[in-house]
Amino acid sequence: MSTIEQNQLRNAHKFLDLLSTSPVDFDALADLLSPDFIFEHYPSTINMKPRNKAETIPFLKRGWNENFEYIKFSPPIDTIQGKDVVVFHVKSDGMHKSGKKYGNEYMLTFYFTGEKIARMKEFADSKYTVDYFASL
């Protein structure tokens, strides 16, 4: 594995590690992202528009700070790495501010330009997410 591939894998892990640390260092998270970063949400049936870097950081801040005491991501269950791409299958364990436990499952695909994350696709368990937030 080349040095750049090692650093891409390290940065994908760092992205999740930063989100798993309270309080989240959103500036350090932003530093991992390329200026033209795009965040896409799937499945498409959830109708969430892609967000650029300027929209993603406030979106994540709002989600973490307004809804959750914490969210921690598991070490990847599966990791696939190719040229300029890393895919993780992960689970989360968290606590909503209401005191209700939160645990979701994700496929996260990180696309790189050099060592910076240029695009991320999040495919979450949408049924769990809808059911969870409807029950609050």
Image: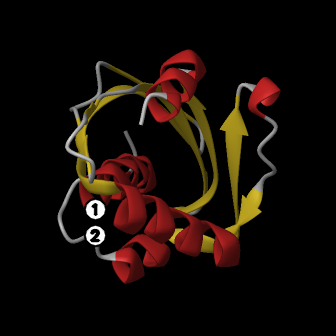
Question: In the figure, is residue 127 to the left or right of 78?
Answer: right
Residue under the point 59% across and 45% down: 84
Residue under the point 73% across and 61% down: 51
* Residue 117 shows up from this direction: yes
Question: For the view shown, which residue lies furthest in the bottom direction?
Answer: 27
Give the mark, 1 or 2, whose residue is nearer the N terminus.
Answer: 1
Neighbour class for label 2 at 10 Å: few (<14), some, many (≥20)?
some
Classify mark 2: helix, strand or loop. loop
Residue under the point 75% across and 31% down: 46
* 49 up-or-down from 61: above or below: above
What is the total number of numbered labels drawn onto the structure image?
2
* Amino acid at dot 1: Leu
- Whole-percent x and y of residue 75? 21, 32
Image quadrant where residue 135 sits: top left
* Amino acid at dot 2: Val
Where the C terminus falls, by quadrant? top left
Where the N terminus falls, by quadrant? top left
Q: Are marks 1 and 2 in contact (CB under 8 Å)?
A: yes
Residue under the point 31% across and 52% down: 10
- Whole-percent x and y of residue 38? 72, 59
Image depth: mark 1 or mark 2 in front = 2
Query: Mark 1 highlights which residue?
Result: 18
Give the Cα distance between marks 1 and 2: 6 Å
Image quadrant where residue 31 sits: bottom left
- Whole-percent x and y of residue 18? 28, 62
Query: Mark 2 highlights which residue?
Result: 24
Classify mark 1: helix, strand or loop. helix
